[in-house]
Image: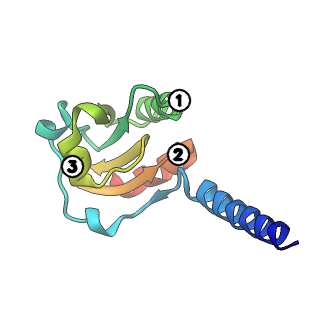
Amino acid sequence: MTGLVVCLAVLALASVYGVLHRRRSGRVTVRGRDDGKLLGAAELGEGLGERATLVQFSSAFCSPCRATRRVLGEVADMVPGVSHVEIDAEDHLDLVRDLGILKTPTVLVLDADGRIVRRATGQPRKADVIAALGEAV
């Protein structure tokens, strides 16, 4: 009987963790430790957008990265002055460590100066990306 109670408790805790993790994944947030960080063409390998830049950190075998690439590309095409830059996390490990990126896809929203204003870990929704751009432009 004790084994059954322990099994049910572990199952309940794992379910709560799974639900909380799923709700947080893809949410665009403001990150305090990124305040003041500037990214430019040297770090990104491309120039910044006139109004804002969407920076996506991806990896080769990441299926949510493909969907995120599509969403960010659509948003960049829809909003004038916004560019989308995709960075292979495996090829830029120093930058990944410096920015504290732990998971792909991770999306950074940069303003025109290259300052990080928002961050999303996981696949963001298009509406959330557009709302995050409102602060950047």
Q: What residue is shown at x 11% (from left), y 37% (from top)? A: 42
Residue located farthest toward the right when viewing the structure as drawn: 1
Q: Nearer the viewer, residue 136 or 107?
A: 107
Residue wearing tag 1: 63
Q: What residue is shown at x 25% (from left), y 53% (from top)? A: 99
* Of marks 3 and 2, the one in the foreground: 2
Q: Could you tell me if the residues under marks 1 and 3 are in contact, i.e. CB atoms within 8 Å?
A: no
Which structural element holds mark 3? loop
* Of marks 2 and 1, the one in the foreground: 1
Tell me which numbered mark, 3 or 2, is placed earlier along the sequence: 3
Which structural element holds mark 2? loop
Where residue 61 sits in the image (x, y, percent)?
45, 27
Q: Could you tell me if the residues under marks 3 and 2 are in contact, i.e. CB atoms within 8 Å?
A: no
Which structural element holds mark 1? helix
Tell me which numbered mark, 1 or 3, is placed earlier along the sequence: 1
Residue wearing tag 3: 114
Where residue 60 sits in the image (x, y, percent)?
40, 26
Tell me which numbered mark, 2 or 1, is placed earlier along the sequence: 1
Q: Nearer the viewer, residue 81 or 47?
A: 47
Q: Quadrant of residue 126?
A: top right
Residue wearing tag 2: 124
Horizontally, residue 57 falls left or right of residue 8, namely left
